[in-house]
Protein backbone atom coordinates (compact mmCIF):
# COMPACT_ATOMS: atom_id res chain seq x y z
CA UNK A 1 0.00 0.00 0.00
CA UNK A 2 1.43 3.44 -0.99
CA UNK A 3 2.09 6.29 1.44
CA UNK A 4 -0.89 8.34 0.28
CA UNK A 5 -3.22 5.38 0.68
CA UNK A 6 -1.80 4.79 4.14
CA UNK A 7 -2.66 8.35 5.12
CA UNK A 8 -6.25 8.11 3.97
CA UNK A 9 -6.90 4.75 5.62
CA UNK A 10 -5.31 5.57 8.95
CA UNK A 11 -6.58 9.12 9.43
CA UNK A 12 -10.06 7.86 10.22
CA UNK A 13 -8.79 6.84 13.64
CA UNK A 14 -7.65 10.40 14.48
CA UNK A 15 -10.41 12.02 16.51
CA UNK A 16 -11.43 15.65 16.08
CA UNK A 17 -10.96 16.21 19.78
CA UNK A 18 -7.24 15.47 19.55
CA UNK A 19 -6.68 18.78 17.79
CA UNK A 20 -9.42 20.80 19.42
CA UNK A 21 -11.58 21.01 16.29
CA UNK A 22 -15.35 20.76 15.90
CA UNK A 23 -15.18 19.61 12.28
CA UNK A 24 -16.84 22.73 10.91
CA UNK A 25 -13.84 24.53 9.49
CA UNK A 26 -12.88 22.44 6.47
CA UNK A 27 -10.18 20.29 8.07
CA UNK A 28 -10.02 16.78 6.66
CA UNK A 29 -8.37 13.46 7.48
CA UNK A 30 -5.09 14.38 5.77
CA UNK A 31 -4.85 17.59 7.81
CA UNK A 32 -5.37 15.66 11.03
CA UNK A 33 -2.75 13.13 10.03
CA UNK A 34 -0.21 15.88 9.31
CA UNK A 35 -0.67 17.16 12.85
CA UNK A 36 -0.55 13.72 14.40
CA UNK A 37 2.59 12.63 12.57
CA UNK A 38 4.35 15.94 13.21
CA UNK A 39 3.66 15.89 16.94
CA UNK A 40 4.73 12.29 17.38
CA UNK A 41 7.84 12.58 15.21
CA UNK A 42 11.39 13.86 15.72
CA UNK A 43 12.08 15.11 12.20
CA UNK A 44 12.73 18.74 13.16
CA UNK A 45 14.76 17.93 16.24
CA UNK A 46 16.90 15.42 14.36
CA UNK A 47 17.80 18.08 11.80
CA UNK A 48 18.85 20.73 14.33
CA UNK A 49 20.72 18.08 16.33
CA UNK A 50 22.64 17.07 13.23
CA UNK A 51 23.40 20.63 12.15
CA UNK A 52 24.65 21.79 15.54
CA UNK A 53 26.61 18.59 16.21
CA UNK A 54 28.15 17.91 12.82
CA UNK A 55 28.78 21.53 11.83
CA UNK A 56 28.51 23.66 14.98
CA UNK A 57 28.83 27.43 14.73
CA UNK A 58 28.35 28.89 11.26
CA UNK A 59 29.65 32.45 11.02
CA UNK A 60 28.66 34.03 7.70
CA UNK A 61 31.37 34.05 5.07
CA UNK A 62 33.58 31.49 6.80
CA UNK A 63 34.59 27.93 6.03
CA UNK A 64 32.11 26.83 8.71
CA UNK A 65 29.20 28.41 6.85
CA UNK A 66 30.40 26.71 3.67
CA UNK A 67 30.38 23.34 5.46
CA UNK A 68 26.87 24.13 6.69
CA UNK A 69 25.71 24.70 3.11
CA UNK A 70 27.17 21.35 2.05
CA UNK A 71 25.56 19.66 5.06
CA UNK A 72 22.19 21.23 4.27
CA UNK A 73 22.31 20.25 0.60
CA UNK A 74 22.95 16.65 1.64
CA UNK A 75 20.19 16.76 4.28
CA UNK A 76 17.63 18.29 1.91
CA UNK A 77 18.33 15.52 -0.60
CA UNK A 78 18.20 12.87 2.13
CA UNK A 79 14.72 13.90 3.28
CA UNK A 80 13.43 13.88 -0.29
CA UNK A 81 13.32 17.52 -1.36
CA UNK A 82 13.62 18.18 -5.09
CA UNK A 83 15.61 20.74 -7.11
CA UNK A 84 18.09 21.07 -4.23
CA UNK A 85 20.62 23.77 -4.99
CA UNK A 86 22.74 26.60 -3.62
CA UNK A 87 22.17 30.12 -4.91
CA UNK A 88 25.51 31.82 -4.18
CA UNK A 89 26.27 35.43 -3.37
CA UNK A 90 29.22 37.34 -1.94
CA UNK A 91 29.46 39.17 1.37
CA UNK A 92 32.08 41.29 3.18
CA UNK A 93 33.82 38.83 5.51
CA UNK A 94 34.63 39.46 9.17
CA UNK A 95 36.24 37.29 11.84
CA UNK A 96 36.74 37.60 15.56
CA UNK A 97 40.18 37.79 17.18
CA UNK A 98 41.62 38.37 20.63
CA UNK A 99 39.20 40.18 22.95
CA UNK A 100 40.12 41.23 26.48
CA UNK A 101 39.20 44.01 28.86
CA UNK A 102 40.13 44.97 32.40
CA UNK A 103 39.52 47.77 34.85
CA UNK A 104 42.94 49.23 35.64
CA UNK A 105 41.77 51.54 38.43
CA UNK A 106 40.40 52.14 40.96
CA UNK A 107 39.60 48.43 41.51
CA UNK A 108 41.67 46.28 39.12
CA UNK A 109 39.79 43.29 37.68
CA UNK A 110 39.09 41.45 34.44
CA UNK A 111 35.91 42.06 32.43
CA UNK A 112 34.20 39.62 30.06
CA UNK A 113 33.20 41.07 26.71
CA UNK A 114 33.01 40.28 23.01
CA UNK A 115 33.46 42.33 19.85
CA UNK A 116 30.33 43.23 17.91
CA UNK A 117 30.11 41.95 14.36
CA UNK A 118 31.66 44.34 11.87
CA UNK A 119 33.70 46.21 14.49
CA UNK A 120 37.15 47.48 13.67
CA UNK A 121 40.05 46.49 15.91
CA UNK A 122 41.79 48.49 18.57
CA UNK A 123 45.45 49.24 17.93
CA UNK A 124 47.58 46.11 18.29
CA UNK A 125 48.46 46.86 21.90
CA UNK A 126 44.90 47.83 22.82
CA UNK A 127 43.52 51.05 24.29
CA UNK A 128 43.77 52.27 27.87
CA UNK A 129 41.59 55.23 28.77
CA UNK A 130 39.06 56.69 31.17
CA UNK A 131 35.43 55.58 30.99
CA UNK A 132 32.64 58.06 30.29
CA UNK A 133 29.27 56.61 31.35
CA UNK A 134 25.92 57.02 29.62
CA UNK A 135 23.01 55.24 31.34
CA UNK A 136 21.14 54.90 28.03
CA UNK A 137 21.81 55.31 24.32
CA UNK A 138 19.42 58.27 24.35
CA UNK A 139 21.67 59.97 26.89
CA UNK A 140 24.58 59.63 24.48
CA UNK A 141 22.47 61.01 21.62
CA UNK A 142 21.61 64.03 23.77
CA UNK A 143 25.24 64.72 24.71
CA UNK A 144 26.96 67.72 23.09
CA UNK A 145 29.34 67.16 20.21
CA UNK A 146 32.92 66.87 21.36
CA UNK A 147 34.05 66.35 24.91
CA UNK A 148 34.80 62.63 24.62
CA UNK A 149 38.21 62.91 22.98
CA UNK A 150 40.30 59.85 23.71
CA UNK A 151 37.73 58.35 26.09
CA UNK A 152 36.08 54.92 26.17
CA UNK A 153 32.30 55.34 26.21
CA UNK A 154 30.21 52.91 28.27
CA UNK A 155 26.50 52.70 27.32
CA UNK A 156 24.24 50.76 29.65
CA UNK A 157 20.45 50.45 29.30
CA UNK A 158 18.57 47.25 30.12
CA UNK A 159 16.40 45.25 27.76
CA UNK A 160 12.89 44.37 28.92
CA UNK A 161 11.56 40.83 28.55
CA UNK A 162 8.44 40.25 26.44
CA UNK A 163 6.92 37.21 24.73
CA UNK A 164 7.21 38.90 21.33
CA UNK A 165 10.67 40.35 21.98
CA UNK A 166 9.36 43.91 21.85
CA UNK A 167 12.24 45.15 24.00
CA UNK A 168 14.86 44.15 21.44
CA UNK A 169 14.43 47.05 19.03
CA UNK A 170 14.84 49.84 21.60
CA UNK A 171 17.74 48.08 23.35
CA UNK A 172 19.45 47.31 20.05
CA UNK A 173 19.94 50.97 19.11
CA UNK A 174 23.13 51.17 21.18
CA UNK A 175 24.53 48.09 19.43
CA UNK A 176 23.71 49.34 15.95
CA UNK A 177 24.65 53.00 16.33
CA UNK A 178 26.67 53.35 19.54
CA UNK A 179 30.01 53.52 17.73
CA UNK A 180 28.75 56.19 15.34
CA UNK A 181 27.32 58.44 18.05
CA UNK A 182 30.36 58.07 20.30
CA UNK A 183 32.73 58.54 17.36
CA UNK A 184 31.01 61.80 16.40
CA UNK A 185 31.89 63.12 19.84
CA UNK A 186 35.55 62.09 19.73
CA UNK A 187 35.51 58.81 21.68
CA UNK A 188 38.22 56.26 21.00
CA UNK A 189 36.12 53.12 21.69
CA UNK A 190 32.75 51.95 23.02
CA UNK A 191 31.63 49.20 25.36
CA UNK A 192 27.92 48.49 25.81
CA UNK A 193 25.79 46.44 28.14
CA UNK A 194 24.94 43.34 26.10
CA UNK A 195 21.60 43.40 24.32
CA UNK A 196 19.99 40.55 26.22
CA UNK A 197 17.75 39.70 29.16
CA UNK A 198 19.89 37.24 31.12
CA UNK A 199 22.06 37.57 34.21
CA UNK A 200 24.69 35.08 33.05
CA UNK A 201 28.31 36.04 32.54
CA UNK A 202 28.04 35.55 28.78
CA UNK A 203 28.39 38.59 26.51
CA UNK A 204 26.01 38.88 23.53
CA UNK A 205 27.46 39.67 20.13
CA UNK A 206 25.51 40.97 17.11
CA UNK A 207 26.00 43.12 14.04
CA UNK A 208 26.71 46.84 14.30
CA UNK A 209 26.83 49.57 11.66
CA UNK A 210 29.15 52.49 10.89
CA UNK A 211 27.98 55.71 9.31
CA UNK A 212 29.85 56.61 6.14
CA UNK A 213 30.78 60.07 7.38
CA UNK A 214 32.17 59.10 10.83
CA UNK A 215 35.57 57.51 11.45
CA UNK A 216 35.00 53.95 12.77
CA UNK A 217 35.96 53.12 16.34
CA UNK A 218 36.00 49.71 18.08
CA UNK A 219 32.86 48.52 19.88
CA UNK A 220 32.31 45.53 22.16
CA UNK A 221 29.60 44.19 24.48
CA UNK A 222 30.05 43.43 28.18
CA UNK A 223 28.21 40.56 29.83
CA UNK A 224 25.34 41.74 32.04
CA UNK A 225 27.12 40.99 35.36
CA UNK A 226 30.20 42.86 34.17
CA UNK A 227 28.07 45.81 33.12
CA UNK A 228 26.48 45.74 36.59
CA UNK A 229 29.92 45.67 38.18
CA UNK A 230 31.13 48.59 36.10
CA UNK A 231 28.03 50.60 37.01
CA UNK A 232 28.58 49.96 40.73
CA UNK A 233 32.17 51.17 40.50
CA UNK A 234 31.13 54.28 38.59
CA UNK A 235 28.41 55.01 41.15
CA UNK A 236 31.14 55.38 43.78
CA UNK A 237 32.19 58.56 42.03
CA UNK A 238 35.63 57.38 41.07
CA UNK A 239 37.35 57.85 37.73
CA UNK A 240 37.40 54.44 36.12
CA UNK A 241 40.19 53.52 33.75
CA UNK A 242 39.85 50.55 31.39
CA UNK A 243 42.22 48.60 29.15
CA UNK A 244 40.48 47.27 26.04
CA UNK A 245 41.95 45.04 23.35
CA UNK A 246 39.85 43.54 20.54
CA UNK A 247 41.39 42.30 17.31
CA UNK A 248 38.66 41.37 14.81
CA UNK A 249 39.53 41.68 11.15
CA UNK A 250 37.78 42.22 7.84
CA UNK A 251 38.50 39.31 5.49
CA UNK A 252 37.37 40.83 2.19
CA UNK A 253 34.78 39.42 -0.18
CA UNK A 254 33.71 35.94 0.93
CA UNK A 255 31.21 33.40 -0.43
CA UNK A 256 27.82 32.77 1.12
CA UNK A 257 24.62 31.36 -0.31
CA UNK A 258 21.00 30.32 0.12
CA UNK A 259 20.23 26.59 0.14
CA UNK A 260 16.93 25.72 -1.55
CA UNK A 261 14.86 22.56 -1.85
CA UNK A 262 11.30 21.99 -3.02
CA UNK A 263 8.26 19.79 -3.03
CA UNK A 264 7.22 20.50 -6.60
CA UNK A 265 3.55 21.27 -7.08
CA UNK A 266 1.35 18.91 -9.06
CA UNK A 267 -0.93 21.48 -10.74
CA UNK A 268 0.64 24.93 -10.35
CA UNK A 269 4.34 24.22 -9.83
CA UNK A 270 5.32 27.78 -10.77
CA UNK A 271 3.43 29.16 -7.74
CA UNK A 272 5.50 29.15 -4.55
CA UNK A 273 4.70 28.80 -0.86
CA UNK A 274 8.01 29.65 0.82
CA UNK A 275 8.99 28.52 4.32
CA UNK A 276 12.43 29.53 5.51
CA UNK A 277 14.98 30.00 8.26
CA UNK A 278 18.57 31.20 8.30
CA UNK A 279 21.49 28.82 8.17
CA UNK A 280 24.30 31.01 9.47
CA UNK A 281 24.88 31.77 13.14
CA UNK A 282 27.18 33.77 15.33
CA UNK A 283 30.43 32.11 16.33
CA UNK A 284 30.12 32.04 20.12
CA UNK A 285 27.67 29.13 20.51
CA UNK A 286 26.44 26.48 18.07
CA UNK A 287 23.46 28.44 16.77
CA UNK A 288 20.83 26.06 18.11
CA UNK A 289 18.00 28.48 18.86
CA UNK A 290 19.29 31.06 16.38
CA UNK A 291 18.57 29.58 13.96
CA UNK A 292 19.27 25.88 13.79
CA UNK A 293 15.83 25.42 15.30
CA UNK A 294 14.24 27.24 12.37
CA UNK A 295 16.10 25.10 9.84
CA UNK A 296 14.89 22.00 11.66
CA UNK A 297 11.31 23.27 11.90
CA UNK A 298 10.92 24.22 8.24
CA UNK A 299 12.83 21.32 6.71
CA UNK A 300 11.16 18.96 9.17
CA UNK A 301 7.75 20.24 8.10
CA UNK A 302 8.56 19.45 4.47
CA UNK A 303 9.86 16.03 5.52
CA UNK A 304 6.52 15.23 7.19
CA UNK A 305 4.66 15.89 3.93
CA UNK A 306 7.15 13.90 1.86
CA UNK A 307 7.05 10.92 4.21
CA UNK A 308 3.27 10.82 3.89
CA UNK A 309 3.45 10.82 0.11
CA UNK A 310 1.65 14.14 -0.17
CA UNK A 311 2.02 16.23 -3.32
CA UNK A 312 0.61 19.79 -3.03
CA UNK A 313 -0.89 21.67 -5.96
CA UNK A 314 1.59 24.53 -5.57
CA UNK A 315 5.31 24.16 -4.93
CA UNK A 316 6.47 24.31 -1.32
CA UNK A 317 9.95 25.83 -1.27
CA UNK A 318 12.24 25.50 1.76
CA UNK A 319 14.99 28.13 1.96
CA UNK A 320 17.93 28.08 4.38
CA UNK A 321 19.10 31.68 4.03
CA UNK A 322 22.79 32.52 4.33
CA UNK A 323 24.36 35.54 6.01
CA UNK A 324 21.27 36.70 7.93
CA UNK A 325 23.14 37.72 11.06
CA UNK A 326 25.33 40.21 9.25
CA UNK A 327 22.53 42.21 7.65
CA UNK A 328 19.82 39.95 6.15
CA UNK A 329 22.11 39.52 3.15
CA UNK A 330 20.58 36.18 2.15
CA UNK A 331 17.10 37.68 2.21
CA UNK A 332 18.12 40.55 -0.04
CA UNK A 333 20.04 38.21 -2.36
CA UNK A 334 16.98 35.97 -2.71
CA UNK A 335 14.71 38.94 -3.41
CA UNK A 336 17.03 40.28 -6.10
CA UNK A 337 17.67 36.90 -7.74
CA UNK A 338 13.94 36.15 -7.89
CA UNK A 339 12.77 39.68 -8.70
CA UNK A 340 11.08 38.55 -11.92
CA UNK A 341 9.05 35.80 -10.26
CA UNK A 342 8.13 37.29 -6.90
CA UNK A 343 4.61 37.66 -8.25
CA UNK A 344 4.45 33.85 -8.24
CA UNK A 345 5.28 33.69 -4.52
CA UNK A 346 1.80 33.34 -3.06
CA UNK A 347 2.81 33.18 0.64
CA UNK A 348 6.07 33.33 2.62
CA UNK A 349 7.04 32.90 6.25
CA UNK A 350 10.10 32.21 8.39
CA UNK A 351 10.99 30.48 11.64
CA UNK A 352 13.63 32.61 13.37
CA UNK A 353 12.70 33.05 17.02
CA UNK A 354 13.95 29.93 18.76
CA UNK A 355 12.20 26.67 19.51
CA UNK A 356 9.40 27.56 21.92
CA UNK A 357 5.85 26.81 20.73
CA UNK A 358 3.83 29.53 18.99
CA UNK A 359 1.18 31.35 21.00
CA UNK A 360 -0.52 33.32 18.21
CA UNK A 361 -0.65 33.68 14.44
CA UNK A 362 0.13 36.98 12.73
CA UNK A 363 -1.30 37.88 9.34
CA UNK A 364 0.39 39.83 6.57
CA UNK A 365 -2.56 39.23 4.23
CA UNK A 366 -6.25 40.04 4.17
CA UNK A 367 -7.38 38.17 1.04
CA UNK A 368 -7.41 34.45 1.81
CA UNK A 369 -6.88 34.87 5.52
CA UNK A 370 -9.66 32.33 6.12
CA UNK A 371 -7.22 29.57 5.12
CA UNK A 372 -4.68 30.70 7.71
CA UNK A 373 -7.40 31.21 10.31
CA UNK A 374 -8.47 27.59 9.82
CA UNK A 375 -4.90 26.48 10.46
CA UNK A 376 -4.75 28.68 13.57
CA UNK A 377 -7.99 27.13 14.84
CA UNK A 378 -6.60 23.64 14.31
CA UNK A 379 -3.62 24.60 16.44
CA UNK A 380 -5.79 26.32 19.08
CA UNK A 381 -3.97 29.60 18.40
CA UNK A 382 -5.55 33.07 18.36
CA UNK A 383 -4.98 35.57 15.58
CA UNK A 384 -2.74 38.38 16.76
CA UNK A 385 -3.68 42.03 16.41
CA UNK A 386 -0.39 43.05 14.78
CA UNK A 387 0.61 42.57 11.17
CA UNK A 388 3.82 40.87 10.08
CA UNK A 389 6.47 40.95 7.37
CA UNK A 390 6.87 37.18 7.74
CA UNK A 391 10.29 37.26 9.42
CA UNK A 392 13.69 38.95 8.98
CA UNK A 393 14.73 37.29 5.71
CA UNK A 394 11.18 37.47 4.36
CA UNK A 395 11.02 41.23 4.93
CA UNK A 396 12.84 42.23 1.71
CA UNK A 397 10.42 40.27 -0.47
CA UNK A 398 7.42 41.32 1.64
CA UNK A 399 8.23 44.92 0.74
CA UNK A 400 7.89 43.87 -2.90
CA UNK A 401 4.35 42.65 -2.29
CA UNK A 402 4.83 38.98 -1.35
CA UNK A 403 2.03 38.02 1.11
CA UNK A 404 3.15 36.80 4.54
CA UNK A 405 2.07 35.22 7.79
CA UNK A 406 3.99 34.20 10.90
CA UNK A 407 3.69 31.87 13.84
CA UNK A 408 4.61 34.08 16.80
CA UNK A 409 6.65 31.94 19.16
CA UNK A 410 7.01 32.62 22.87
CA UNK A 411 10.29 34.52 23.07
CA UNK A 412 10.14 35.49 26.75
CA UNK A 413 13.50 33.82 27.42
CA UNK A 414 14.89 33.91 23.88
CA UNK A 415 17.18 36.86 24.56
CA UNK A 416 18.72 35.09 27.56
CA UNK A 417 20.59 32.93 25.02
CA UNK A 418 20.58 35.01 21.83
CA UNK A 419 24.05 35.59 20.31
CA UNK A 420 25.89 34.06 23.30
CA UNK A 421 28.05 30.98 23.96
CA UNK A 422 24.95 29.60 25.72
CA UNK A 423 23.04 29.11 22.43
CA UNK A 424 23.42 25.33 22.37
CA UNK A 425 21.27 22.27 21.67
CA UNK A 426 20.53 21.45 25.32
CA UNK A 427 18.21 24.48 25.43
CA UNK A 428 15.80 22.88 22.92
CA UNK A 429 12.88 20.63 23.90
CA UNK A 430 12.11 18.05 21.18
CA UNK A 431 8.37 18.31 21.91
CA UNK A 432 8.48 22.05 21.32
CA UNK A 433 10.22 21.56 17.98
CA UNK A 434 7.56 18.98 17.04
CA UNK A 435 4.76 21.46 17.79
CA UNK A 436 6.39 24.02 15.52
CA UNK A 437 6.85 21.40 12.80
CA UNK A 438 3.13 20.60 13.03
CA UNK A 439 2.23 24.26 12.58
CA UNK A 440 4.49 24.78 9.56
CA UNK A 441 3.56 21.50 7.89
CA UNK A 442 -0.17 22.14 8.15
CA UNK A 443 0.10 25.77 7.07
CA UNK A 444 2.32 24.98 4.08
CA UNK A 445 0.05 22.14 2.98
CA UNK A 446 -3.14 24.18 3.26
CA UNK A 447 -1.65 27.27 1.57
CA UNK A 448 -0.18 25.20 -1.26
CA UNK A 449 -3.59 23.65 -1.98
CA UNK A 450 -5.72 26.77 -1.50
CA UNK A 451 -7.51 28.39 -4.41
CA UNK A 452 -7.07 31.74 -2.68
CA UNK A 453 -5.05 34.63 -4.08
CA UNK A 454 -3.18 35.69 -0.94
CA UNK A 455 -1.71 38.62 -2.83
CA UNK A 456 -4.74 40.94 -2.70
CA UNK A 457 -4.20 44.05 -0.56
CA UNK A 458 -0.43 43.49 -0.37
CA UNK A 459 0.89 46.22 -2.69
CA UNK A 460 4.55 46.75 -3.51
CA UNK A 461 5.79 49.20 -0.86
CA UNK A 462 9.50 48.97 -1.65
CA UNK A 463 9.67 52.15 -3.67
Image (cartoon, rainbow, N blue to C red):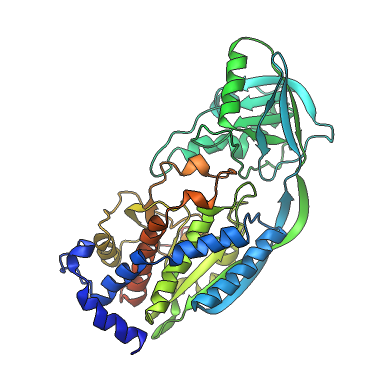
Residue found farthest to the bottom: 1
Q: Is residue 185 above or below residue 87?
A: above
Residue at image location 39% in from the left, 75% down from the top: 305
Q: Is residue 401 above or below residue 204?
A: below
Residue 182 lies in what quarter of the image? top right
Residue at image location 66% in from the left, 60% down from the top: 65
Q: On the rendered image, what quadrant is the N terminus found in?
A: bottom left
Tag count in the figure? 0
The reply to whether residue 53 is visible in this rendering is yes
Q: Nearer the viewer, residue 191 or 79?
A: 79
Q: Is residue 41 left or right of residue 173?
A: left
Residue at image location 20% in from the left, 61% down from the top: 20
Measured from the top left, where is residue 250 in percent x and y?
A: 76, 49
Residue found farthest to the top: 237
Q: Is residue 6 above or below residue 418?
A: below
Residue 106 lies in what quarter of the image? top right
Amino acid sequence: MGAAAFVLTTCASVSVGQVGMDGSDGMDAVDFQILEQSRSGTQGYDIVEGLTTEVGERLAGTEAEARARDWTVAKFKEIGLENVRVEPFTIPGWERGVETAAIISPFPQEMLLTALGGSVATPAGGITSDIVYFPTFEDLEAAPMGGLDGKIVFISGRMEKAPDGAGYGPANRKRQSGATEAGKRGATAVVIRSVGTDSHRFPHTGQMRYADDVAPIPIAALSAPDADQLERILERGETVRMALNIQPRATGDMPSGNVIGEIVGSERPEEIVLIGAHLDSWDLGTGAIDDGAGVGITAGAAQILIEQGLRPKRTIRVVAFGAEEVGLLGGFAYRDRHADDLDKHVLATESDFGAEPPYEVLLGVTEGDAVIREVAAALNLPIGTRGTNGGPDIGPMARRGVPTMRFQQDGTDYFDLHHTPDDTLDKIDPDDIAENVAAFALMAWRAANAETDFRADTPDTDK
